[in-house]
Amino acid sequence: MRKLDSAVSGIHQTDARSFMRELPDASFDLIVCDGPYAVTTHEWDNVPDIQHFNLELLKSFSRLLKPGGAAYLFGKPDCVDFIDYRPLLTLQSRLVWYQPSRLAQGRVSYTNNYDVICYFTKGKVKTFNLDAIRVPQLVELEHRLRCERVPSVRNGKYGKTAFHPDGKNPGDVWGDIKQLTYKSKELVSRELLNTIQKPEKLMERIIKASSNPGDLVFDPFCGAGTVPVICERLGRRFVACEINPDYCRIAEERMAKAANGNESSENLFEFSTVGRNGQLVISQACLV
Ligand SMILES: C[S@@+](CC[C@H](N)C(=O)[O-])C[C@H]1O[C@@H](n2cnc3c(N)ncnc32)[C@H](O)[C@@H]1O
């Protein structure tokens, strides 16, 4: 069995499945798993039965998570169909990452416009930092405030519906985070577009929601290193692995830049509020 401390803050060039077998039980607060989807032509994505592949992953995650820890499993809409994950982990949400502008268009059926991100926990949720991931209210403010004048809302009976000045829960359909395009400043190379590199904002929402500074995050399929970069930026510790040596090198270069604070302007975070007419108002931007 590998000592966990020796694995922390490293990007390990290895097969995730054998690597996980060497790790001790209850090691991680959060696992972010953006591995094979079984839909692309990459050799590593040639997985004949993705549901059983994912079931094996979930068995490992169930062992590796601390009680209450969270695992996010990325995939296509059918990625956990007809497998019984219930003895292992609790499926809290099937998040939909909605991508309306997907270029590939279906000819014999409807174009698939979303990925799913299955959000599991090991038992009762330990960490859910809603305030860290609030998004602007899109419901017209006037309408919203009028509803809140209703006595049953004011006297607390429906208090959970109350307008929150810092924004709302992002919900389980995430249409506000765009896929990377070839123009995205954070894109490492065009080869990584679409099937490999994920937007930093997507990983950031997950990491902010389900971990705290100092927590230990595991990314078994780290590709170009988006999760390690965000962990570094947000003060989380991480363990990551990736089978492809070229991607490991890219991830390490990104990490080095993140550690030096020498990152792209995509790290500008916008703070937005809702104007009187319910429209979004970008009020300020700052480097984090
Ligand atoms: C979808 S990409 C991950 C992208 C990453 N989230 C990012 O933003 O850059 C999946 C990665 O899993 C890697 N991979 C596939 N099978 C693997 C395995 N058995 N062990 C480790 N890495 C693997 C692939 O090389 C690929 O880089």
Image: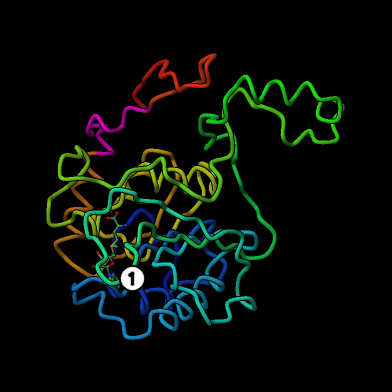
What residue is shown at x 24% (from left), y 68% (from top)? 107
Q: Residue furthest front?
A: 108
Relative to residue 31, is residue 269 depicted above or below?
above
What residue is shown at x 52% (from left), y 37% (from top)? 133
Q: Quadrant of the N terminus?
A: bottom left
Q: Amino acid at mark 1?
A: Tyr
What residue is shown at x 66% (from left), y 25% (from top)? 144
Q: In the image, which residues are magenta?
A: 258-269
The image position of residue 251, as x and y in percent, is 23, 53
Relative to residue 273, is residue 188 depicted above or below?
below
Q: Decide whether residue 246 is among the magenta residues.
A: no
- In which image quadrant can residue 45 be found? bottom left
- In which image quadrant can residue 153 be found? top right
Report the image quarter containing ligand 1.
Answer: bottom left
15 on left or right of 143: left
The residue that disc 1 covers is 37
Q: Quadrant of the C terminus?
A: top left
What residue is shown at x 13% (from left), y 50% (from top)? 189
The image position of residue 285, as x and y in percent, is 36, 20
User: Could you say whether the residue bearing mark 1 is in a helix, strand or loop?
Assistant: loop
240 on left or right of 68: left
Query: Is residue 68 or residue 197 the one in the foreground?
Result: 197
- In which image quadrant can residue 26 be found? bottom right
- Density class for disc 1 (Cα within 10 Å; few <14, some 14-19, many ≥20) is many
116 on left or right of 243: right
Relative to residue 231, is residue 77 depicted above or below?
below
The image position of residue 260, as x and y in percent, is 25, 34
The image position of residue 44, as x and y in percent, is 23, 75
19 on left or right of 223: right
Q: Is mark 1 within 8 Å of ligand 1?
A: yes
- How has the structure been colored for display? rainbow
